[in-house]
């Protein structure tokens, strides 16, 4: 298959889709900050889901600071932060948000002629870890502001 | 008697959101975390409606829906599919198997209530 989808198109879609997910599920306004520096997180919660098909493979990562992840969980579940049952509940929400982001991208890729399937989401939580893409994988970071919090969506994409 | 709804989703988050959406209504929510558990719950509970995720481990929603439609005792139970994938192929695939409606994530709780109310009776709980 010729490469009809460009990573810039993917990032454009993801910017719109993330704002939609935050608005619909969290009633929060997330604003893309072009050319912003990546934020330095302390403890970080990263949700991810992969996608793969004959012509395209990749993954989407949602990186949130631990305090902001708790805020996101609180907003999605409609519970005050103190009523959340713990890290597992926050992790599950961040995983579901990553799943929604990746599911939307999968649909967009399918409609653009690059059919693929999505994996179930995974979570990494910690203070010191790095995610390195495989060789030949294009990587883009999209930085967003939501109120006083800054977070990142990382997109990995490889055309086969 | 409350309306009984089976919510099948591997994400506890989505099951909590579904439960929250129906809290003002006289609805009993039964939960299952994958298609296999969902089928067992459908046999055991005979729900009035099923809200079914597509992508799940162990048994996915499309497989569960197919098995549901093959079972004479369960095939009439209306199903709303909940999917993070809105692509044409995905929607066509689930439409072919026979769902009453579908909802694409992200979704507003109001949309879920509106689609459910078209299928089963939803009575508001009396104010306490």
Image (spheres, coloured by chain):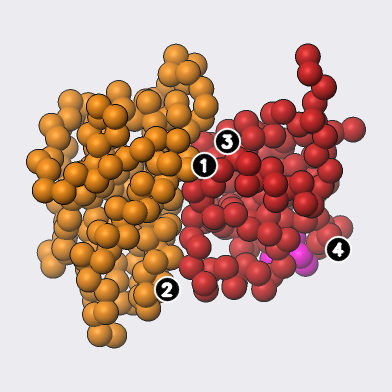
Q: Nearer the viewer, mark 4 or mark 3?
A: 3
How would you rate the neighbour count of disc 1 (Cα within 10 Å): few for under 14, some for 14-19, many for 20 or more?
many
Image location of residue A132, percent across then percent down: 14, 51
Image location of residue B21, percent across then percent down: 64, 35
Q: Is A105 situated above or below A96?
A: below
Viewer-closest of B23 and A85 = B23
Do discs 2 and 4 belong to a common subunit?
no
Q: Is A141 situated above or below B99?
A: above
How would you rate the neighbour count of disc 3 (Cα within 10 Å): few for under 14, some for 14-19, many for 20 or more?
some
Image location of residue A48, percent across then percent down: 32, 47
Q: Nearer the viewer, mark 1 or mark 2?
A: 2
Do discs 2 and 3 belong to a common subunit?
no
Q: Name which residue lies at 26% across and 66% down.
A: A9
Picture quadrant where residue A138 is located: bottom left
Q: Name which residue lies at 36% across and 69% down.
A: A109
**Is residue B86 left or right of A33 when viewed as pictured?**
right
Q: Label for residue A111?
A: 2
Q: CA distance from mark 1 to mark 2?
A: 26 Å
Callout 3: SS? helix
Q: Is residue B57 visible?
A: no
Callout 2: SS? helix
Q: CA distance from mark 2 to mark 4?
A: 36 Å
Callout 4: SS? loop
Residue at numbered disc 1: B11
């Amino acid at each position: 298959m010729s490469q009809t989808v460009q990573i810039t198109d993917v990032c454009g879609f993801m910017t719109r889709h993330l704002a939609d997910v935050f608005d619909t599920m969290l009633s929060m306004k997330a604003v893309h900050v072009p050319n912003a520096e990546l934020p330095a997180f302390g403890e970080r919660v990263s949700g991810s889901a992969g996608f793969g098909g004959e012509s395209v493979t990749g993954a989407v990562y949602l990186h949130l600071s631990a305090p902001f992840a708790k805020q996101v969980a609180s907003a999605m579940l409609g519970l005050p932060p103190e009523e959340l049952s713990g890290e597992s509940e926050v992790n599950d929400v961040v995983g579901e948000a990553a799943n929604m982001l990746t599911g939307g991208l999968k649909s967009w890729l399918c409609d653009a002629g690059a059919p693929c399937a999505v994996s179930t989401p995974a979570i990494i939580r910690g203070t010191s870890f790095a995610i390195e893409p495989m060789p030949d994988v294009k990587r883009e970071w999209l930085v967003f502001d939501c109120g006083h919090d800054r977070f990142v969506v990382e997109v990995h994409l490889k055309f086969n | 008697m409350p309306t009984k709804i089976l919510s099948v989703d591997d994400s506890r988050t989505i099951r909590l959101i579904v439960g929250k959406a129906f809290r003002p209504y006289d609805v009993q929510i039964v939960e299952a975390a994958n298609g296999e558990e969902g089928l067992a719950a459908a046999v055991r509970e005979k729900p009035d409606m099923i809200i079914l995720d597509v992508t799940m481990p162990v048994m996915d929603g499309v497989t569960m829906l197919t098995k549901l439609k093959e079972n004479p005792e369960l095939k009439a139970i209306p199903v709303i599919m909940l999917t993070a994938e809105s692509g044409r192929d995905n929607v066509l695939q689930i439409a072919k198997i026979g769902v009453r409606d579908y909802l694409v994530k992200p979704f507003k709780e109001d949309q879920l209530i509106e689609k459910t109310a078209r299928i089963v009776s939803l009575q508001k709980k009396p104010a306490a």
